[in-house]
Amino acid sequence: MTARTMRQPRVKPEHRAYRTVDGHVRIGSVVHGIGAEVKDPGGWVWTLVEAMDGSRGAAEVVAEVCRRHAGLPAEDVVQAMADLTAAGYVEDAGAPPPAELSERERERYGRGMTLLRWMDLEPRESPWEPQLRLGRARVLLVGVGGTGSAAARDLVASGVGALHCVEPDVVELSNLNRQTLFTERDLGTPKVDAALAALHALNPHPAVTGERREVRGPADLAALLAEGPPQGGPGYDALLLAADRPPRIRRWANEVCLATGTPWAEAGYRGPLVAVGVFTPGRGACWECLRDAEAERRDLRLGPGQDEEAASPRMDWNPVNAMTAGLSGSLLAHAALMLLCGIPPVEPGCRFGLNLMVPGDPVMQRSERRPDCPACGTVPAEDLP
């Protein structure tokens, strides 16, 4: 989509421009990573963004700006409009509503569409394109505990196309402080059954399925990905890992996703630290690269013979409440949007989150792909699936 092919170019409502005290034009909101400032000594850029209000065609916009600024070359206006469109600040107000979504679905997902539109910096035929892409996506979710139940809730509410949930456990009383899909009436019920009932009640549109199944090794994960959703068709667009056992399950997921070329994300909590990792084979670090780089970065000052567990011990129980579990699950759902829709446009191969002990102190880990990585270092990026 270019400015010339738009029926009625309009600056996105969330990106509405304003003039600074020195006459520059700020557009894209004041959110870091979205907004930009354009020098405008002649004042015509401001006229341009005002003219792109959705009431005119592209040629009419150019004519209006040139009418109000005599001597201004039309080519300059066309180029500026193209630049603003390429930067993601302009949409087509004349785009018809998508036939793929009913009027009721457009009402249901309308607020989510505007958020995606705000964060989206790609030109689109329609502002509904990212929502449609989410609605076509097929996601495998492993683990429907604290993190997984929150991620499933958020994805289903947001309109994911198909979600297949895998979980072996039953609902226990100690789960109810954080696994908010479940109630006391679900005690003793397989988690996957209780989760499906809650998710279907939340939103009937997505194809939500599940099975009671335990992952005991990489072969189990590979089989799940190969089987695809119960409704048939090709495999999954993404794997979301919300299980924390067996302890090597993240390593298995990394291995299997590298072998199959499957984008994936994992999330969880460790006390007040809540984080999500986002990975795409062939783009950036894999999970193993990131883990090894972080181990080298930290200086735990361990004594001779001490394991790093001494500095951050693992316990037989998970110190967690509904807030930490909910945050990790929402971050996992957010990571899914990044992988499935490209919004926000964050490069994979990173882990990010929050330290709840120190507001404003983010968790951010990023590494280059490591040539010596035991998982992906021996395979050239261009040879990955």
Image: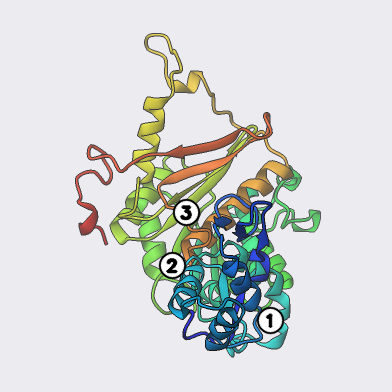
What amino acid type should be assigned to the residue bearing mark 1? Glu
Q: Locate residue 250 relative to residue 193 in the image: left or right.
A: left
Q: Nearer the viewer, mark 1 or mark 3?
A: 3
- Relative to 379, does residue 41 appear above or below in the rendering? below
Q: Secondary structure at mark 1?
A: helix
- Residue indicated by mark 2: 237
Measured from the top left, where is residue 197 in percent x and y? 70, 68
What amino acid type should be assigned to the residue bearing mark 3? Val
Measured from the top left, where is residue 207 in percent x and y? 58, 76
Measured from the top left, where is residue 170 in percent x and y? 64, 53
At 62% across and 72% down in the image, what residue appears? 47
- Quote the CA–CA distance across marks 1 and 2: 22 Å
Q: Are marks 1 and 3 in contact (CB under 8 Å)?
A: no
- Quote the CA–CA distance across marks 2 and 3: 17 Å
At 59% across and 49% down in the image, what residue appears? 32
Q: Secondary structure at mark 2?
A: loop
- Relative to 208, does residue 24 appear above or below in the rendering? above
Compare residues 292 and 4 and report the one nearer the observer.
4
Q: Locate residue 272 relative to residue 125 in the image: left or right.
A: right
Compare residues 110 and 249 and report the one nearer the observer.
110
Compare residues 190 and 348 and report the one nearer the observer.
348
Q: Quadrant of the C terminus?
A: bottom left
Residue 346, label in figure = 3
Q: Residues within 10 Å of mark 3 (few under 14, many from 20)?
A: few
Q: In terms of sequence position, does the residue under pointer 1 or pointer 3 come before the other?
A: 1
Measured from the top left, where is residue 282 in percent x and y? 30, 55
Residue 292, label in figure = none
Q: How many marks?
A: 3
Residue 105, label in figure = 1
What amino acid type should be assigned to the residue bearing mark 2? Asp
- Relative to 271, does residue 265 appear above or below in the rendering? below
